[in-house]
Image (spheres, grey):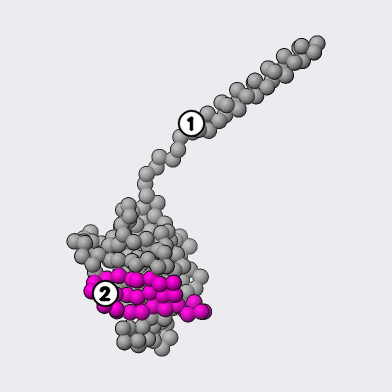
Amino acid sequence: MKNSITQILIFTFWLAFIVSCSNNNQANNFPSNTNSTPIVNPIANVADKTEKIKFKTEGGADLFAVKQRPDGAKLVDAKEQELARIKTDESGVIKFKNAQDQVLGYVINSEGSWIVKNSEKKDLYLLKRNKNNNYQLEDTSQKLIYQITVNKTGLEISTPDKKIVYQIRIKEDKISLRNASGSTVFSTKSNMSPIAFACFGLDALTREQQAALAYAVNLKGG
């Protein structure tokens, strides 16, 4: 009787062992996701706060750059000449000045939106994120200026009547701003949120306003 019980226990042990091995093999052999279609996250790849973000022409020449610091940044041209100085105060308000230390305006971070103000702190523009993770730029009268939509290859900046102004293309380690005909205007290989990069395609803003808004968006990751 004892031998029979022992045999049953041994058989049960080996049966459990075999089932366990079979399950592990099935888990290891389970096919992985082979979908190679890029999924664009408009808030991914936020740049390090001390990284210099370089923007270059299609030919590889320096165009301008944003030199980041822990408490702000500088916008410089291809010759490293300062164009604007961006600074974040203790309350989180972003102020930007020109090279002559004159205040040009402010950017206020809100939940899912950013307000661009002039030097007198009057509202000029509002960039906000929609529920579908698309973005839009409005003026003070809530009139739509640009719609920024996310697609599989990047982003598109279009007018209210849906005419494409720019395309932002993300390929490997490079983000490019292309015009409506598909020609590259400039690009960067620095780590940067795609929606922050898109701010440089908002032609209604000055370059200084674009840089301050891009810095604010990149700081929050979109």
Q: Main secondary structure of the magenta part?
A: strand
**How dense is the environment of label 1, judged by Cα within 10 Å: few (below 14), some, or many (20 and up)?**
few
Do we see residue 111 in this rendering? yes
Do we see residue 167 in this rendering? no
Q: Which quadrant is the N terminus positioned in?
A: top right
Q: Position of residue 142 (x, y in %)?
A: 42, 76
Q: Residue at x 37, y 60 (%)?
A: 191
Q: Along the horizontal axis of the image, is 144 left or right of 91?
A: left
Q: Residue at x 31, y 83 (%)?
A: 99
Q: Position of residue 27 (x, y in %)?
A: 53, 33
Quadrant hosting residue 194: bottom left
Sequence-wise first label, 2 or 1: 1
Q: Along the horizontal axis of the image, is 162 left or right of 127?
A: left
Callout 1, which amino acid?
Asn
Which label sits on residue 78? none
Q: Nearer the viewer, mark 2 or mark 1?
A: 2
Does residue 60 lie above or below 214 as drawn?
A: above
The local secondary structure at tag 2 comes to loop
Q: Is residue 160 magenta?
A: no
Q: Residue at x 31, y 59 (%)?
A: 189
What's the magenta region?
A: 64-93
Determine which residue is flagged by label 1: 29
Quadrant hosting residue 149: bottom left
Q: Nearer the viewer, residue 51 or 210?
A: 51
Q: Position of residue 5 (x, y in %)?
A: 77, 15
Does residue 149 lie above or below 102 as drawn?
A: above
Which label sits on residue 80? 2
